[in-house]
Image: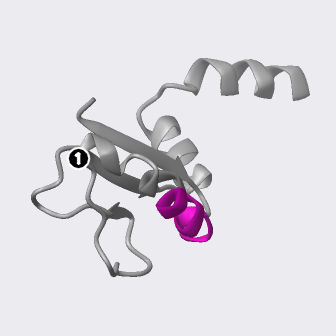
Amino acid sequence: MDAIVFIGEEIDDAVPFIFKACRKLKFLGLKLKRGRKEDKVFIDLTTADSLIKVFCLKYNKWDVLADCVKEGQYEKKINVILKMWV
């Protein structure tokens, strides 16, 4: 195992739980940082010499949806829905 990634909208609220869970993986060579920076989109919870990395990624579902629409991934579905309303 090289890395563990936690993803969520309210990831800051979950970090205490993540720390608690990861402390139990210390025997695998996982080393947690003592402090962390708040309100970041990408949070690395491990030290540079940790054998396993732990990352937290914060996302906003509305930003993800907007990006998908911009890229045209939902264009066909949106057109179908609009045709149903007309």
Q: Quadrant of the N terminus?
A: top left
Residue 14: percent from the left, percent from the top? 60, 63
Task: Tell me: residue 68, above or below residue 73.
Answer: below
Q: Secondary structure at mark 1?
A: loop
Residue 86 visible in image? no
Q: Which residues are magenta?
A: 11-20
Q: Amino acid at mark 1?
A: Gly
Residue 2: percent from the left, percent from the top? 23, 34
Residue 3: percent from the left, percent from the top? 29, 39
Q: Residue furthest right?
A: 85
How crowded is the residue under tag 1: few (<14 C-alpha within 10 Å), some, or many (20+)? few
Nearer-the-camera pick, 31 or 84: 31
Residue 63 visible in image? yes
Picture quadrant of residue 80: top right
At horizontal 51% and vertical 46% (from top left) the residue drawn is: 64
**Residue with the mark numbered 1:** 29
Residue 37 drawn in magenta: no
Task: Tell me: residue 50, above or below residue 65.
Answer: below
Residue 61: percent from the left, percent from the top? 60, 50
Picture quadrant of residue 83: top right
Residue 15 drawn in magenta: yes
At horizontal 40% and vertical 44% (from top left) the residue drawn is: 5
Task: Tell me: residue 19, above or below residue 78.
Answer: below
Q: Quadrant of the C terminus?
A: top right
At horizontal 57% and vertical 25% (from top left) the residue drawn is: 75
Nearer-the-camera pick, 70 or 23: 23
Majority secondary structure in the magenta region: helix
74 displayed left or right of 4: right
